[in-house]
Image: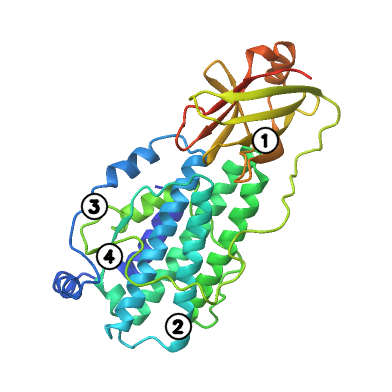
Amino acid sequence: MHDAQKIMRARMSRRTLFKGAGALGLGATLAQTGLIRLEPNSHASLVRSALAQTESIQDILNITATVESFGVTILGVGLESNAQGNFTPAWTAGEVAIITAARAQEQFHLEFFQSLGGQILVDTFHIPDPAILTDHDTFFATVRDQEERETAAQIAAFNTFTAMGRPDLIKVSFQYAAEESEHRLLANYATGARPPNDLAFAPMLYNSASEIIAELEALGIIGGTGPSATYPGPGTIDPTNVTNRTPDGPVVSCLLPNAGGVVLTAQLTTLVGSEAFGFAKLTVNTRLGQVCAQISVARVNGPTTAQIRAGGAVVSTLSIPSMDGLSSGCVLLDAAIAQAIIANPGNYSVVITSGDNPDGVLQGHLMPL
């Protein structure tokens, strides 16, 4: 555990989560209201399995989907608890409106990352300190600190997205983190912090996005023994006052534009007997050390990766086709690999995977244009 993690966990412990006295009795009382259930979480091993692997774009999508499902759930439970009169003091009308909108925003985040192939790793979450659902300041401090963690996880994800040459995901990740920072500010204001905008820069708490899952496990939110709630939690999600529900705007790549290079193509055919098909055009440039790709696929259910493979080995990742089946962009490529592809393009293929077919749904060997 690095120092930032230690500091954050200690701060969370002091502020919100581990007050101790009376927790079991209060937990039983809350369970009787029907807001939460007392049951063990059976998914912790799945989460730990994901962390054991080298972090990839798919890992980050799964982590983000899981974290957002927690956000939807805990905000729903909080709204329900307040409606039942459990909070001291009760929330103001403005605070109810803020949390109602925040819950809808978390749901829109979740749905978007699921559209990219993200999968929820665990959908049941635990309440380490029942005061979170009865004490006004404890609840909003918990929200504030969780939003700070979520922003930090996306900052860490930038490293992977940059290495993979994915400016589209960097843009979306920034749009998502910026909005979560708004939640932090509003929750900080609700606790009485003045000024609530007390950070000049968001803290970088993690070296990798997966560390947020380890943090939630350490806090007892994932895999804990406290009262539990399952996504999406109680109550209807109300998106009435939320606009701009999907990330918009152009994507700009900071990689050098392709100057020259060798153009190769691949006709993509199904590997699984489906009706999927597609086409890829690659420009490999040894001088710039990059490959630029334009990909078009059809009848693929949720593309998750686009790769250049030599046999079964992945030698480069490419921009993943979006929901409309199209992608374009440039990624860095080792010069020796670029030279090998140009020399023997038939030894390499473009492979598209999907959630239904993680080993590959489409494949096509490269050939000169």
Q: Amino acid at mark 3?
A: Asn
**What is the CA distance from the residue labelled 4 to the residue labelled 1?**
45 Å
Near mark 2 (Cα within 10 A), the count class, few <14, some 14-19 or many ≥20, is: some
Q: Which mark's residue is nearer the viewer, 1 or 3? A: 1
Q: How many marks?
A: 4
Q: Are marks 3 and 4 in contact (CB under 8 Å)?
A: no
Residue at point 51%, 71% (across, down): 183
Measure how far apart labels 3 and 4 are at the Cα level.
12 Å
Q: Amino acid at mark 2?
A: Glu
Q: Amino acid at mark 1?
A: Ser
What is the secondary structure assignment of the residue under circle 2?
helix
* Distance between the alpha carbons at the discs numbered 4 and 2: 21 Å
Question: Which residue shows up at 41% across the image and 60% down it?
Answer: 8
Q: Nearer the viewer, mark 4 or mark 2?
A: 2
- Residue carrying label 3: 41
Q: Quadrant of residue 163?
A: top right
* Amino acid of disc 4: Ile
**Among the two numbered marks 4 and 1 on one chain, the one whose residue lies closer to the N terminus:** 4
Q: Which mark is residue 119?
A: none
The disc placed on residue 95 is 2
Q: Can you say whether 44 is above or below 94 in the image?
A: above
* Mark number displayed over residue 127: 4
Find residue 247 and report its horizontal and vertical position in percent: 62, 58
Q: Nearer the viewer, residue 321 or 227?
A: 321
For the residues labelled 1 and 3, the Cα–Cα distance comes to 41 Å
Per the image, the residue denoted by label 1 is 296
Indicate left or right for 121 with 200 as reference. left
Quadrant in which residue 27 is drawn: bottom left
